[in-house]
Amino acid sequence: MRIVMTLLFSLLAPLAMAADLTEKDVKHWMEAMPALENWLDQHEDQLPEEDFSAGESSIDAMFNKGIEQLKAAGLYDDFSKQVKAGGYKNIEHWAEISRRVTMGYMALEMENEQVSLSQLEAQLEQIRQSEGMPAEQKMMMEQMMGASLMMMRAVENVSEQDKSAVRPFRQQLADQFAESGDDDE
């Protein structure tokens, strides 16, 4: 299931936001995801193992890489059939809705955090300037802080409409994401 979440986030290639996300979109996505996750689980061994956290400069780059991996593995057309059976026009349409639901959920979760973007940037700079920290520990801390910064910057651009559409389903989404994450273990 680890690859499912990685693939989910990888497939979420950003497209131009043509219309506002609606509660109906969120509900439909939640209903379609179990079957799509099941398909991804069944084909997990055909996809390359990738560490998406290393070396990626943006969430968008990770999303694009996931679609390319489906194509490279020869699974794009088969997954496209699954996505269409789930009521989406194509993988890119599903990916856009997936990205917006996921980012809307993450934006709502981060609203509760007490740490601001500027505070994280200051902490990262402090780590970089730290002379007494072992290089390996410093690198690990920089990667963690960098990932947090990247995520915070990405959710800053989530529209109020997307957050409003996701808000009524917040707990259900939390449960669904937790369940997906538990399958990795």
Image (spheres, grey):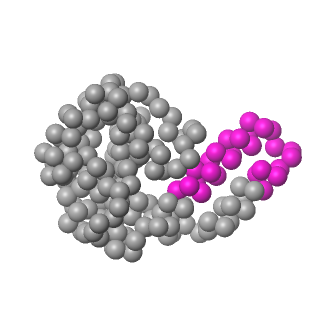
Most distant residue in the right direction: 131
Question: Which image quarter holds the C terminus?
Answer: top left
Magenta: main secondary structure equals helix
- Residue visible at 20% across and 45% down? 83
- Residue visible at 34% across and 69% down? 162
- Residue visible at 35% across and 61% down? 16
Whether 143 is among the magenta residues is yes
Which quadrant of the figure has residue 168? bottom left
Query: In x, y percent, where is residue 39?
Result: 23, 35
Residue closer to the observer: 127 or 180: 127
**Residue 100 visible in the shown view:** yes
Question: Which image quarter holds the N terminus?
Answer: top left
Query: In x, y percent, where is residue 136?
Result: 74, 36
- Residue 81 to residue 45: above or below: below
Whether 23 is among the magenta residues is no
- Residue visible at 41% across and 46% down? 63
Q: Which residues are magenta?
A: 126-151
Residue closer to the observer: 164 or 55: 55
- Residue 115 to residue 41: above or below: below
Query: In x, y percent, where is residue 9?
Result: 40, 47
**Residue 6 visible in the shown view:** no
- Residue 54 to residue 15: above or below: above
Query: In x, y percent, where is residue 78?
Result: 20, 34
Query: For the image shown, how many numbered marks are present on the structure?
Result: 0
Most distant residue in the top direction: 45
